[in-house]
């Protein structure tokens, strides 16, 4: 009897220790999670609710492409526990009611294991109620606002807006900008941004000049930008969606000398098309976006992006020559993280997979997005250390980006005097000329 | 308020005026407000993108192909709208028929152009300085096109046999038919002409404004609003209505803020409909 108790205690201790280890050690799933267990299921259904038609179809189509690429890769490697992934697509358009209804349908479908979408924070608010009630695991690659600690079953695979805006304001401070404003759609996201800028701006030595609201019906943002210029704006935060391209065009038309800045939406080549060469200098805060970087891509990002381009191609702006792949790697991260979590606990049970997703810690070099995934209790796949600020530039070879803050790592190259970077331990660096060479020196 | 705001409003107003004019051209002989009309705008944008932007074709060749494509689209649209109307006999069939046509064309553009926002270079990359503001040649071309189409349409209606036929059908379609006026060819001509007109403005305006493959319905609504303000069926009303909503939106957004632009447009619509239920230049029309 005593011997049996000792064995049980030893097993329990091993299990406990093992759990602790997996909770803290980095996960190592490889670029494609392989079959490591048998789920005894034939298929795993993954829902996608996104605008597949209408003016934001670009978003839905990109999400679908990236999800399909990951699904095909995992299926080719044996599936998740042997189960093959199948996408179930629902077109939510730009309709919050349709999106919420699709969310209800997929949340109530027991054969659906994971739902991606609906995009847009306001739409997700409605859908989340259904997901939480049905205990449906879901992942959101286009929801910047909202606090995901409020959701037990929801994860975000986008930069949290507070991290994005903080990163941008940090760069503005270093560039010695004093006054800035915002041109953004009227709505909950703009409201959150406005409140955050209002509350936090002064901490970075910035005077926030306020929010010029826009609607999707305007054919010019000259009026809004002119008002901010008249107030002395040196920088303007622009909308993340394609309508923000009107602000880029306004900057060109009004010869705005200040800085435009935005979130990951500023990777849309519509901005380069409308803003022309004047779009150079625009700041973009985003989870890793290596496509326009002139440096080596992370292996996971390269594997994913190469596969997307091979299957779906890339777009080229006819005016600007700027390019972008027809996929969005942050959507791919949803499925990738789900597969890794399911493999980790060797189960498709929602609660077990959810708990495993919370404790994931996957290095940046492996993930499709090239960003470290470690959601934690905040349920944000990317934490603030995953947000970079890039500056758009153009030269004879075309458009490219430079990292402005180099949050994660010391920049490999020291491109010009005054360039800012950080060491891996977070110490600030500044690029300086020593003799004929450019080298990094300790910064402020 | 800077002069630039008024110039921007004049440009936007001219775009909406041409759209309203093209809807009026179709409305006169059919008494149908074609909700698929904005798809012609997207056709102009898409072909401009394809021919000027991607294939780098010469301008004249592109315009010729654009007009041929618009003729084809107008012909197809006439069949998609008029056939259900004629077959059903319901006086409301045009609503669903035009919306269905809009959805079909929109889907076709979405299938062909994934992840694309149409854009290409201005035909002439030059600005004209005006007291500190500037007017690009591209915007000027759209404003001139609006005036040109208005004058040509006016003279066509007054001075040609086909034009007088359209006016006769607009006045009384049944009597026109009894008098031997070829109603169906006139209606076909109206659809084709209306599509050519709106495709041309889509072609010229796209280097200035953002046009997505699914944006047709937006332009239809703007043109529809302009036509209602000016008076349904009145070419003069279409132009004035378009200019009112373009200028009002630009000036009010600059004065009160972005979200007030749309409000002011529809507030103006409401006020005008209360004071002049048939619009500024419209005449009372008996329903069919």
Image (cartoon, coloured by chain):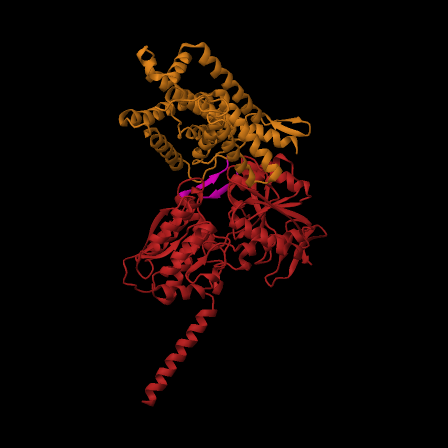
Total numbered labels: 0
The quarter holding residue A20 reads: bottom left
In the displayed image of the protein, which residue is found farthest to the right? A435
> Can residue A343 be seen?
no
Rendered-image quadrant of the C terminus of chain B: top left
Nearer to the camera, B237 or A13: B237
Residue A111's spot in the image, x, y percent?
30, 57
Magenta segment: does it hold A320? yes
Residue B65, quarter of picture: top left
Q: Is residue B152 above or below residue A140?
A: above
Residue A139's quadrant in the figure? bottom left
Q: Is residue A97 above or below residue B213?
A: below
Q: Which is nearer the eye, A319 or A409?
A: A319
Name the quarter where the N terminus of chain B is drawn: top right
Numbered range of the magenta stretch: A312-325
Q: Position of residue A118 (x, y in %)?
A: 42, 50
Residue at 44 percent across and 55 percent down: it is A333
Please give left or right for residue A436 compared with residue A266 in the image: right
Chain given the colour orange: B
Q: Which residue is at the far bottom?
A: A2
Residue A241 lies in magenta, yes or no?
no
Residue shown at 39% from the left, 66% from the top: A344
Relative height, residue B258 to residue B135 (above, below): below
Percent position of residue A331, x then y: 43, 52
Q: Could you tell whether A214 is left or right of B224 in the image?
A: right
Chain identifier, colour red: A
Please state the horizontal and vertical placement of residue B264, each as a whole percent of the image.
54, 35
Residue drawn 62% across the image and 58% down it: A422
Query: Quick one: A224 or A373, which is closer to the camera?
Result: A224
Q: Does residue B273 show up? A: yes
């Amino acid at each position: 009897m005593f011997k049996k108790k000792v064995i049980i205690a030893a097993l329990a201790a091993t299990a406990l220790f093992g759990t602790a280890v997996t909770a803290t050690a980095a996960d190592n799933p490889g670029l494609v999670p392989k079959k490591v267990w048998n789920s005894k299921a034939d298929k795993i259904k993954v829902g996608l609710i996104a605008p597949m038609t209408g003016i934001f179809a670009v978003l839905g189509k990109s999400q679908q492409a990236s999800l399909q690429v990951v699904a095909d890769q995992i299926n080719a490697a044996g599936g998740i526990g042997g189960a093959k992934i199948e996408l179930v697509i629902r077109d939510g358009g730009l309709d919050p009611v349709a999106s919420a209804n699709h969310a209800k349908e997929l949340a109530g479908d027991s054969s659906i294991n994971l739902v991606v979408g609906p995009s847009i924070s306001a739409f997700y608010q409605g859908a989340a109620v259904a997901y939480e009630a049905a205990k449906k695991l879901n992942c959101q690659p286009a929801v910047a606002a909202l606090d995901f600690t409020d959701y037990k079953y929801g994860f975000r695979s986008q930069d949290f807006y507070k991290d994005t805006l903080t990163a941008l304001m940090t760069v503005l401070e270093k560039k010695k900008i004093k006054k800035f404003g915002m041109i953004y759609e009227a709505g909950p996201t703009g409201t959150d941004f406005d409140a955050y800028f209002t509350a936090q701006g002064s901490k970075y030595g910035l005077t926030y000049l306020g929010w010029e609201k826009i609607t999707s019906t305007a054919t010019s943002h000259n009026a809004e930008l002119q008002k901010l210029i008249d107030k002395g704006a040196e920088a303007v935060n622009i909308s993340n969606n394609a309508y923000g391209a009107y602000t880029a065009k306004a900057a060109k038309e009004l010869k705005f000398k200040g800085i435009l800045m935005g979130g990951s939406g500023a990777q849309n080549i519509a901005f380069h098309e409308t803003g022309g060469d004047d779009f150079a200098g625009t700041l973009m805060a985003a989870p890793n976006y290596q496509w326009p970087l002139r440096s080596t891509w992370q292996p996971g990002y390269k594997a994913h992006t190469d596969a997307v381009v091979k299957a779906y191609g890339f777009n080229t702006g006819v005016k600007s020559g700027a390019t972008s792949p027809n996929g969005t790697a942050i959507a791919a991260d949803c499925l990738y993280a789900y597969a890794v979590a399911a493999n980790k606990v060797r189960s498709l049970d929602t609660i077990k997979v959810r708990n495993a997703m919370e404790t994931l810690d996957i290095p940046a070099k492996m993930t499709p997005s090239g960003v470290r995934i470690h959601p934690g209790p905040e349920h944000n796949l990317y934490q603030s250390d995953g947000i970079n600020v890039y500056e758009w530039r153009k030269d004879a070879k075309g458009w490219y980006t430079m990292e402005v803050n180099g949050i994660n790592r010391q920049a490999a190259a020291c491109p010009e005097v005054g360039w800012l970077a950080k060491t891996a331990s977070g110490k600030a660096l500044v690029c300086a000329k020593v003799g004929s060479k450019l080298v990094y020196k300790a910064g402020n | 308020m800077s002069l630039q705001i008024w110039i921007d409003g004049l440009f936007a107003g001219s775009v909406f005026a041409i759209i309203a004019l093209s809807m009026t051209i179709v409305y006169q002989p059919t008494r149908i407000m074609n909700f698929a009309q904005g798809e012609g705008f997207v056709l102009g944008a898409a072909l401009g993108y394809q021919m000027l932007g991607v294939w780098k074709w010469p301008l004249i060749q592109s315009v010729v192909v654009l007009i041929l494509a618009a003729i084809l689209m107008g012909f197809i649209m006439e069949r998609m709208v008029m056939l259900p109307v004629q077959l059903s006999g319901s006086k409301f069939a045009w609503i669903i028929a035009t919306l269905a046509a809009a959805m079909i064309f929109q889907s076709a553009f979405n299938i062909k152009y994934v992840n694309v926002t149409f854009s290409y270079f201005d035909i002439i990359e030059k600005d004209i300085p005006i007291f500190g503001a500037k007017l690009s040649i591209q915007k000027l071309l759209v404003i001139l096109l609006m005036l040109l189409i208005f004058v040509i349409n006016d003279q066509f209606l007054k001075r040609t046999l086909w034009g007088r036929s359209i006016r006769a059908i607009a006045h009384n379609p049944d009597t026109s038919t009894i008098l031997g006026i070829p109603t169906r060819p006139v209606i076909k001509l109206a659809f084709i002409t209306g599509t050519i007109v709106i495709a041309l403005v889509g072609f010229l305006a796209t280097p200035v404004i953002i046009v997505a493959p699914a944006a047709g319905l937006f332009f239809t609504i703007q043109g529809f609003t302009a036509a209602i303000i000016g008076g349904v069926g009145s070419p003069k009303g279409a132009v004035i209505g378009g200019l009112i909503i373009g200028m009002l939106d630009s000036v009010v957004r600059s004065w009160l803020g972005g979200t007030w632009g749309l409000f002011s447009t529809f507030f103006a619509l409401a006020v005008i409909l209360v004071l002049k239920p048939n619009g500024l230049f419209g005449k009372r029309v008996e329903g069919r």
